[in-house]
Image (cartoon, helix red, strand yellow):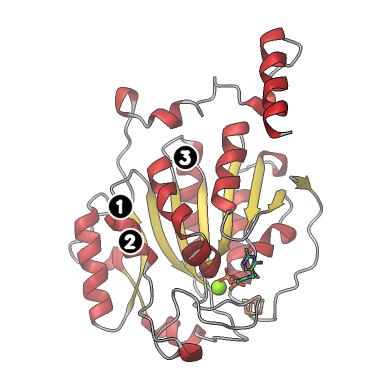
Amino acid sequence: MVQSVKPTASTWCPGCGDFGVLAAAKKALVELKIPPHEAVLVGGIGCSGGIHNFLEINGLHALHGRLLAQAVAVKLANPKLTVIAAGGDGDGYAIGMGHFMHAFKKNVSILYLVMNNETYGLTKGQASPTSRVGYEGNVEQPFDAILTALSIPSGAYLARTFSGDPKTMTAVLSEAIQFNRDHRGYAFVEDLSPCVTYNDTFKEWREKVVNVEKLPGYDPTDRSAVFRLCLETMRDGKIPIGVMHRPPRVDGADANPLELKLLPDHVGPAEADIGIEANRVAYQKLLQSVA
Ligand SMILES: Cc1ncc(C[n+]2csc(CCOP(=O)(O)OP(=O)(O)O)c2C)c(N)n1
Ligand code: SF4
Ligand SMILES: [Mg+2]
């Protein structure tokens, strides 16, 4: 159930990277002057997904690995809402992997924020799809969500940030949310958010992150150029961060057909006036279909 509640005190461990995400998200929402009742955060199951309890906006705690389906549903039901889906690397890249891939195809104007700590924090530190070889007996190569996202043809905004740099993260989250609010499509942001209890990578990541925006040849409208910069950065043992894809504006006939349903003159089912007979019949039909 979507609830509008006062934020509770955080239950995260002191020093958790997720605090950086919380601070950046709060700042971005304030900077963009989004009233709390016009924003919804759909949280995944995990330490990260609990973020919806600590923000004074509407919140929904989704099923593990299914937060994208629920976030898209919220947006379609009421397109005027600013919708953020936020969860962990386990949630998004293991059980939720199918939804992760299809979200680029759907290209609905919501923000998906993955707080990647390379572990299953909430369940006490098992290996996740992004864990390195050797972590908790892991023998698999880590999954790279940004390289994957760059390789999927889509009009999505893409970025990777680091919790140790909340200033950049605030700027990226503001841009991503504004991208959604301008009906330009889906935004995916992966934040490197260390789990100080089960996988404390703060020091290592601080030393290794390289912002691709500062590298020669950087062009955020050219995914192949950014892909190459990421690979070169990784080859040098570093971790690429920054805005990875800032698609040019597409209007009119070329606009995403699903997105057209979300334009301001479209009334979502959640807002339809059921005093009108046709809407009432459609609403009753909808209720019967889920009974
Ligand atoms: C369907 C289902 N499978 C498994 C779980 C158990 N579970 C809860 S959180 C979690 C993983 C948490 O890791 P992540 O998504 O990376 O979030 P973090 O706690 O690291 O922020 C798992 C496997 C569950 N709640 N539901
Ligand atoms: S277990 Fe890890 S991810 Fe969870 S709150 Fe503690 S530090 Fe953060
Ligand atoms: Mg995790």
Q: Earlier in the sequence, mark 3 or mark 1?
A: 3
Q: Are marks 1 and 2 in contact (CB under 8 Å)?
A: yes
Residue 278's place in the image compared with 72, above or below, is above
Give, as a three-letter code, the residue at label 3.
Answer: Val
Give, as a three-letter code, the residue at label 1.
Answer: Ile
Q: Residue at x 57, y 33 (%)?
A: 76
Residue 256's place in the image compared with 19, above or below, is above
x and y, in percent, of residue 116 in the image? 50, 71
Q: Residue at x 74, y 33 (%)?
A: 291
Classify residue 184 as left or right of residue 173. Answer: left
Give, as a three-letter code, the residue at label 2.
Answer: Thr
Residue 120's place in the image compared with 160, above or below, is below
Classify residue 83 as left or right of residue 154. Answer: right
Label 1 environment density (alpha carbons within 10 Å; few <14, some 14–19, many ≥20): some
Give the tally of numbered discs.
Answer: 3
Mark 1: secondary structure:
loop
Q: CA distance from mark 3 to mark 1?
A: 15 Å
Mark 1 CB lies closer than 8 A to ligand 1 = no
Q: Which residue is mark 3?
A: 108
Q: Residue at x 80, y 67 (%)?
A: 9
Q: Which quarter of the figure has residue 35? A: top right
Mark 2: secondary structure:
helix
Classify residue 37 as left or right of residue 194. Answer: right
Q: Which residue is mark 1?
A: 152
x and y, in percent, of residue 50 in the image? 69, 64
Q: Which residue is mark 2?
A: 148
Q: CA distance from mark 1 to mark 2?
A: 7 Å
Residue sitting nearer the eye, 228 or 182 = 228
